[in-house]
Amino acid sequence: MKSTYIFCSLDETSGLPIYATTVGYWEHQPETERLDGFPDYQFHQVLEGWGELTINGDVHRVGPGDCFFLFPNKVHSYRPVSQQWKLSWVSFNGREAGQMMLFAGIGESGIGRLRENKLIMPLEEMLTTTIDNEQEASLERSKLLYALLIDLKYQLITPTDQEFDRIKPVLQYIENNLQRPITLTELADIVAVTPQYLCRIFQLTMNIRPIEYMNQQRIQRSKQLMFQFPKMKMYEIAGKVGFESSSYYGYVFRKLNGMNPEAFKKLHGLL
């Protein structure tokens, strides 16, 4: 791919919740210093070579597989430190741009690490779209920008990823045993930790306690049973998803869905 710099037409896109302003690729990124920052949000993905990014006086070395984010009007600079420094970028704005960054787990200017060292698909499509009409091409790039920010939520490696990998056997165990009561101690034994530490890991990685997670999964399974077996009694469904009490099942269902199981069945034409 040859170096390219695309200015997006804003005639129609500037009214969107998020919209792309520029998209580009450098075969060798030149040194850039912005003492007043840049008016838009920016996402850069490093493809080859090494560079240095300076934000608020802190210097970060970035290379293949790394990316960096720059928020509007924040002083920054970056420069190559290898013979070639290939990277691609998109700048964007819009009333929901900051919220979409938060959705992706990005709250401030900084660096991140991607799970794979290859150009993220939506960004590649922004660069290679074959649409000739400038306004249509800009709308397409803004649509792809939305996909990019959603993808980043799952592409970025976070500090909690290692802990999440650790509890995967617990999640699988819950999935395989929803039909019966499961104790917290039983779950903790799977990964050889204390129940208290398991709760900490769950809170860190899932933002929820193990018992709450189990109840969510039980209720989801109960909904599947309602659709598969519309004539099955509620107390039977409660028993099949591990609730020892049908009244407690009804309480948890109402808490999570804002209605009782019978109202849910009626809403979906199952009664």
Image: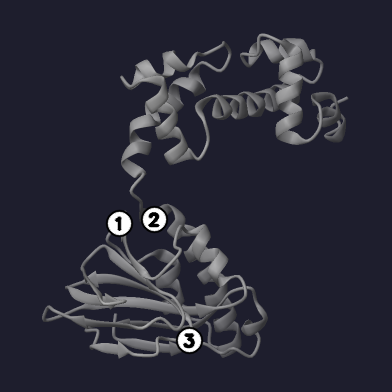
Q: What secondary structure is found at the residue carrying circle 1? A: loop
Q: Residue 269: percent from the left, percent from the top?
A: 86, 32
Q: Position of residue 206 (x, y in %)?
A: 48, 39
Residue bearing the label numbered 2: 155
Going from N to C along the chain, the mark reached first, 1 or 3, is 3
Q: Are the two marked residues, 1 and 2, in contact with CB atoms closer than 8 angstroms?
A: yes
- Residue at (51% x, 61% y) in the render: 102
* Viewer-closest of 138 and 76: 76
The percent coordinates of residue 240 (x first, y second) are 65, 12
Q: Nearer the viewer, mark 3 or mark 2?
A: 3
> From the image, which quarter does the C terminus lie in?
top right
Q: Is residue 187 above or below residue 144?
A: above
In percent of the image, x 70 and y 27: which residue is there? 223
Q: Amino acid at mark 2?
A: Gln
Location of mark 1 (residue): 116
- Asked if residue 232 shows in the view, the reply is no
Q: Earlier in the sequence, mark 3 or mark 2?
A: 3
Q: What amino acid is labelled 3 in the image?
A: Pro
Residue at 44% across / 72% down in the picture? Answer: 125
Real-space Cα separation, disc 1 to disc 3, in angstroms? 29 Å
Q: CA distance from mark 1 to mark 2?
A: 8 Å
**Is label 1 or label 3 in front?**
3
Q: Which residue is mark 3?
A: 39
Tell me: 129 left or right of 44: right
The x, y position of residue 220, in whole percent, is: 65, 29
Which numbered disc, 1 or 2, marks the residue that appears first in the sequence?
Answer: 1
Indicate the secondary structure of the residue bearing disc 3: loop
Figure quadrant of residue 3: bottom left
Q: Residues within 10 Å of mark 2 (few under 14, many from 20)?
A: some
Left or right: residue 190 versus residue 8 is left
